[in-house]
Image (cartoon, rainbow, N blue to C red):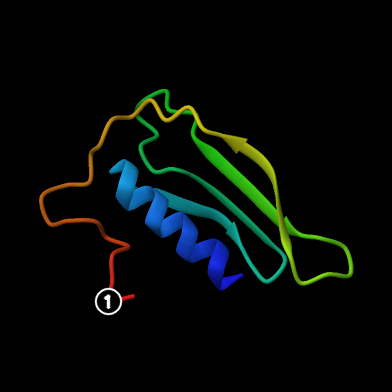
Amino acid sequence: MKKVRLTLIYYSITKKFVYKFMQNDKIRINVECSKKDTSCTWRVYASRMTHNIRFAIKIHNHDHTNGGDMGTDGHRRASRK
């Protein structure tokens, strides 16, 4: 689970956008672009595979149409990790 979240952080920093968790628990992650005022349809849904500790990405809409708006203070999910 931690690797999936960390990968999402790296991806969003690289692509210069901010996302928000719609659903986030031990068995599933559902994230969307945080800019809802635009028509951005970027989304990732991953869930744990049955009887396994691995995660599978079920939905990945990679069309991120909201271009690089992270604000002036840097990326909010950036940390020392």
- Residue marked by disc 1: 80
Say which quadrant the N terminus sits in: bottom right
Q: Which residue is located at x 47 percent, y 55 percent?
A: 8
Dot 1: element: loop
Label tally: 1
Q: On the picture, is 44 further left or further right than 7?
A: right
Q: Quadrant of residue 59?
A: top right
Residue 24 screen position, x and y as percent: 59, 62
Residue 32 position within the rendered picture, expressed as x and y whole percent measured from the top left: 49, 43
Q: Quadrant of the C terminus?
A: bottom left
69 vs 57, left or right, is: left
Residue at x 28%, y 43% (from the top left corner): 16
At 40% from the left and 34% from the top, the residue drawn is 36
Q: Amino acid at mark 1?
A: Arg
Against 26, is 41 above or below? above
Q: Residue furthest right?
A: 51
Q: Nearer the viewer, residue 21 or 4?
A: 4
Near mark 1 (Cα within 10 A), the count class, few <14, some 14-19 or many ≥20, is few
Using the image as rendered, state which of residue 22 and residue 77 is in the foreground: 77
* Relative to 67, residue 57 above or below: below
Query: Going 60% across and 38% down the picture, which residue do you hit?
Result: 60
User: Residue 47: where, in percent of width, then height?
Assistant: 72, 57
Q: Is residue 3 left or right of residue 12?
A: right
- Determine the residue located farthest toward the left in the rendered image: 72
Q: Nearer the viewer, residue 35 or 7?
A: 7
